[in-house]
Amino acid sequence: MAAGYRIEVMHGVNLDMLHRRDPTHYGEMSLLDLERTIEGFAREIGLSTRFFQSNFEGAFVERLHLLEGQADAVIVNAGAWTHYSWAIRDALELTKLPAVEVHLSDVEKRDPWRKISVFDGLCIEKISGKGPEGYRLALQSLQKALKDAPGR
């Protein structure tokens, strides 16, 4: 396990089927390939990662509830829940952890409903349309936020 801050990387609905989704939006990686890539990015900068994926909103909420003392920050790609799950937003807010919202595809250039994020104003950054590289950027952003946080 890499030294440093602990980052929880949470993937939501349908991301377990990443390898079967439209490659023009999501690329051709499986979720396992993506997680290995993210883990490599984290290791390069001295962070440790833990991964979670669920297609069940309640399980996603419960995982967020359990993060106290288990993670220092969160990367969240909630999939379609991003656009309407106030329950996940509330649970993320309860963690009081710095968070970055990530999307593999450029949600701003897709369906109008994808432009809405219930996480707006809660996450320190939203990264969209950068593919797997977006997770590297999210890790770097969280590392900086954690280093700059008072009392760290």
Image (cartoon, rainbow, N blue to C red):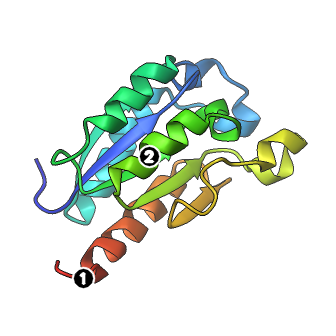
Name the spot of residue 144 as percent of width and height, x first.
34, 76
Q: Secondary structure at mark 1?
A: loop
**Can the viewer see residue 32?**
no
For the point 30% across and 50% down, the residue is 40
Disc ID at residue 79: none
Given residues 59 and 26, the one toward you in this image is 59
Q: Amino acid at mark 2?
A: Leu
For the point 65% across and 47% down, the residue is 118
Mark 1, Cα crowd under 10 Å, few <14 / some 14-19 / many 20+, is few
Name the spot of residue 58 as percent of width and height, x first.
45, 21
Name the spot of residue 136 as percent of width and height, x first.
43, 59
Name the spot of residue 5 as percent of width and height, x first.
19, 60
Q: Amino acid at mark 1?
A: Pro
Q: How many numbered markers are drawn? A: 2
Given residues 1 and 44, the one toward you in this image is 1
Mark 2, Cα crowd under 10 Å, few <14 / some 14-19 / many 20+, is many
For the point 46% across and 28% down, the residue is 31
Q: Quadrant of residue 138?
A: bottom left
Q: Earlier in the sequence, mark 1 or mark 2?
A: 2
For the point 43% across and 40% down, the residue is 91
**Can the viewer see residue 66?**
yes
Q: Secondary structure at mark 2?
A: helix
Residue designated by label 2: 92
Tell me the CA gap for discs 1 and 2. 21 Å
Disc ID at residue 150: 1
Q: Is residue 147 left or right of residue 52?
A: left
Establish if 6 lies above or below 34. below
